[in-house]
Image (tube, rainbow, N blue to C red):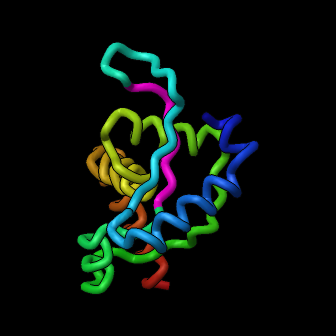
Amino acid sequence: MQAFHDEHGPAMEEFAGHLARTLREIRLVEFTPEKTVSREGHGPRFHLVVSERLADARAWELGEFTQVDMHTTLGRSGLETLDTLIMAGIADTRADAIRWALTRIRERPAYERLRERIQEIDQLRNEF
């Protein structure tokens, strides 16, 4: 799928954009090859997000989400990680996959220790 996207990416994006303009309900366009890998019919796939979920747009309006730079560059391994989470059904989009990963990081005891250490450093800075 990556080779197909590398070769046909602009056409895929144009097609997804056409669908989004034509059918406003579409949020995600998925490309899958004709031949599948597993018995369940799942195989490699590629997603293009064409609009936000209504719930995400509402959360952004309420200040619960903050839009981050959409031009952030991820390497091949980063994109592969996000797409693996999508293919496994853990997330619907790359943004969802990033939110999921950040939640898992926050759940780790090491993250809480790191936050405490940052607070200690800030207190020391304020004392001087």
Query: Is residue 20 within the magenta segment?
Result: no
Is residue 120 found left or right of 108 in the rendered image?
right
x, y percent for residue 11: 68, 55
Instruction: Please give the name of the residue rendered at 31% of the width and 77% of the height, measured from the top-left corner.
Output: 57
x, y percent for residue 70: 57, 68
Give whichever of 63, 11 is nearer the camera: 11
Decide: is 35 above or below 108. above
Give whichever of 85, 114 is nearer the camera: 85
Instruction: Please give the name of the residue rendered at 45% of the width and 35% of the height, measured from the top-left corner.
Output: 84
Decide: is 35 above or below 77. above
x, y percent for residue 45: 49, 36
Q: Is residue 24 visible?
A: yes
x, y percent for residue 120: 38, 67
Decide: is 91 above or below 125. above
Q: Quadrant of residue 72?
A: bottom right
Instruction: Please give the name of the residue rendered at 49% of the width and 48% of the height, measured from the top-left corner.
Output: 47
Give whichever of 12, 53 is nearer the camera: 12
Quarter of the picture holding the N terminus: top right
Instruction: Please give the name of the residue rendered at 65% of the width and 37% of the height, measured from the top-left corner.
Output: 2
Is residue 118 found left or right of 103 in the rendered image?
right
Q: Which residues are magenta?
A: 42-49
Decide: is 115 above or below 124. above
Q: Is residue 113 visible?
A: no
The residue furthest right is: 7
Is residue 110 found left or right of 69 in the rendered image?
left
